[in-house]
Amino acid sequence: MSQTFSGASNADIEDCRAEYARAVDSGNQHEIVETRINLALVYWYSKLYTEAITHLKGAAVTARSIGETKSEISINDYLSIINCELLKYDEALSFAREAVRIARQNGFQKETVNSLINTAAVYMSQRDNVKALDYIMEALGIANAIGNNLLICRCCQIASQIYADMGDSEKSKQYERMYHDTENSLNEQELLKSKQDTQSELFATENEVVTKEKQLHVLEKQNQQTLDSLYRVEMLNNQMRLEMQLISREREIAELRIREKENEIAAAERFKKIAIVVISVITLLLVLLIKFLTDRNRANRRLKTANAELSETYQTVKLQNSLLNSKTKQIEAQRNELERKNNQIIDSISSASRIQKAMMPNRRMITNYFEESFVFFEPRDVVSGDFYWFSDAGRYRYLAVIDCVGHSVQGAFMSVVANSLLNDLVNKKLIESPAEILRMMNVEIIKAWSHDKEHDTSDQGMDVSLCRFDKESNEITIAAANHTVWTVSDGECSEIQGDIYSIGASFADSIDSVFTNHTINNKKGMALYMFSDGFQDQLGGEQGRKFMQENLKKLIISIQDQPLSRQSDLLGEALESWKNGRPQTDDILVIGVKNRFLDI
C-alpha cells in the first residue's frame, strides 16, 4: 500500500497551527479534534512523520473522551497508513485492526468496510496475499449486504489485483468484471433518476396541454356559434340576391324590346367593342415585346457579370495551383529532411548498440569463471534497457542483472549510467558488500536526478540483482532491488526475495534507503538463476496473457536434467511457442550459472 501527497508549505503548517490554537483557546473539544487532525495531515504531507503521529494520537484521546467514534476510526486508519509508509508493518496492522474493532463495536458498517480494506492493503504491502484476500472478502460481503455499490467497486478492484499478484488470472478477471458491472450499475442508477425527472416534467407538460385543449374547445364552440350567425346572414343575402335577379330579368325583357327598335345603335356598339379588342391586343403585343427586350438586356448583363466572375475564379484557381505547387515542393523538402534525420537517428542508435555491446562483458569470460553457465539475452529493439555486468575483483567475483526502466534509447542510456556506477563502486572504490553497492547506486542516482527540478524523474530507476561469489569459501552473497533470485538444487527451487523498491525510483526516493544481503552456501551441483521481468511479462498463449513468474519457475525446474548450455536453447523455444506470432513485449534477460564447488 502506498499513498502519495504533494508537500505542504510552511504557510499551510502555520495556518493549521493557528486554527488549532484558536480551538484550544475556545475550549470547544469537537473543534480541537478537527483542527488537530488537519494539522497532523499537513505534517504528514510534508513528510514530518513524528509530528503527524504525535498530533493524531492526541486527537484520538480527545475524540474518545467526547464520544466522536467516527473521528477515532479515521485517526486509526491514518496512523495505519503512515506506519505502513515507514515500513513499520506491525504497528500499521495494530492501528488498522483497532479501527475495525471500533467500527464493528458501534455498528458502523461503511466505516467497517473502509477499515477492512485498509487492513488488507497493509498485508498486500507485506506480500501476504492470503491474509489480504481474507480481509477484502469480508469487506466485500458487508458492502454487498448494505448495497453500497461504490464500496463494492473498491473491494472488487483490490480483489482483482490480489489474485493477479497470486498468479490466478481467472479469478482476477472475474473480480475485474464484477468491478466494471457494479460501476455500470452506478451509471444506470444515475440514468434512471434522470429519466424519472424527465417523466415528471413530461407529466406537467401534458397537464398544461390538457388545460390548453379545454380552452381551445371553448373557443371553437364560440367560433361555431359565430359561423352559425354568419350562415343565417348569408341565407338572407342569397334570398335578396334572387329577388334582385328576378327584377333584373324583367328589366332585360323590357330592354330587349327596346333594342329591337335600335339595331343601328347596337351595330355601332359592336363595332366599338371590336375596335377596343383590337386596340387591346395591339397594346398587349407591344407590352410583351417591351418585356422581351428588357429581359434580354437583363440576361446579357447577367451573362457579362457571370463571365467576369468566371474569369476571376479562373485567376484564383490559377493562383491556388501555384501556391499548391509551392507547398508540394516545401513538403517534399521537409520529407527529404525527415529521411535524412531519420537515417542519422538510425545510425546513432546503431552506434549506441555497438557501444552497449562493447560495454557488456564477453560471454566467454562468464563461461571461463563458472563451472557451467548460459546467458539468454533478447533485446526488444536495437538497444536495450536490460544488461548484465561481471567483475573479477580479487577474492570475489561479481555478477549482476540490471533491468532499467523503459527500453530502447531511454533504457540504453540508463544502462550506461548503471554500468559506470558498478565499475566505479566495485573496481575503483573497492566496496565489497552487495547491499552497500546497491545503496550507493541509489544515492548517486538520486543525487543526479535531484538537479532536475523541471521534469518528473519517478520513472528513471532500475531493478538490480547482484551476486558475489567468494573464491575462498562456498558462500554466495546476494542483494536485490525489486528482483528475485532462484537457486535450484536436487530438483528443489529456493527463492531469494529482494527488497521491494527499485534503485532511484519514487518508492526508494530517499538517500537513507537500505538494502539487504542474503548469504547462502553453495552446494555441489546447485544452479543459480537471475532474470529481468521481460520473460514473465511476455504476452502470448491462446488468450494473449502474460507468461507469469510462476510458469517461468516451473519451466526452469522442468529442464534441470539438461546442461545449462542446453537450457538457454530450451528457454528460447518455450518463448517462441508462447509468443505464437505476437511481437516481443519487453527486453528479455535470463542468466543461469553453476559456481565451482570448493572441497573445503
Image: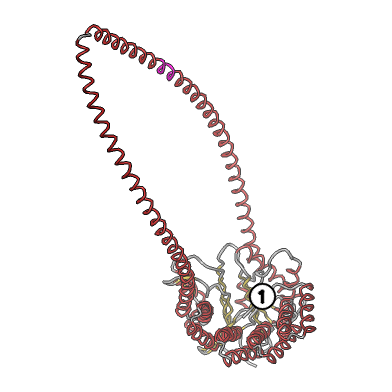
Q: Determine the residue positioned at 54% across, 30% down.
A: 318
Q: Which residues are magenta?
A: 290-296
User: On the rendered structure, is 302 left or right of 236?
Assistant: right
Residue 512 drawn at (x, y percent): 74, 80
Quick one: 10 or 459, which is closer to the camera? 10
Image quadrant holding the C terminus, namely: bottom right
Q: Name the residue carrying label 1.
A: 4
Which one is nearer the viewer's eye here, 186 or 590? 186
* Nearer the observer, 495 or 121: 121
Q: Residue at x 62, y 59 (%)?
A: 349
For label 1, the SS is loop
**In the image, residue 104 lies at what x, y percent?**
57, 91
Coloring applied to the structure: secondary structure
Amino acid at circle 1: Thr
Quadrant of residue 474 within the rendered picture: bottom right
The dominant secondary structure in magenta is helix
Q: Quadrant of the N terminus?
A: bottom right
Q: Is residue 341 left or right of residue 562?
A: right
Q: Report whether residue 175 is seen.
A: yes
Comparing 440 with 307, the one in front is 307
Residue 13: where, in percent of width, then height? 77, 76
Residue 597 spot, x, y in % from top left: 61, 88
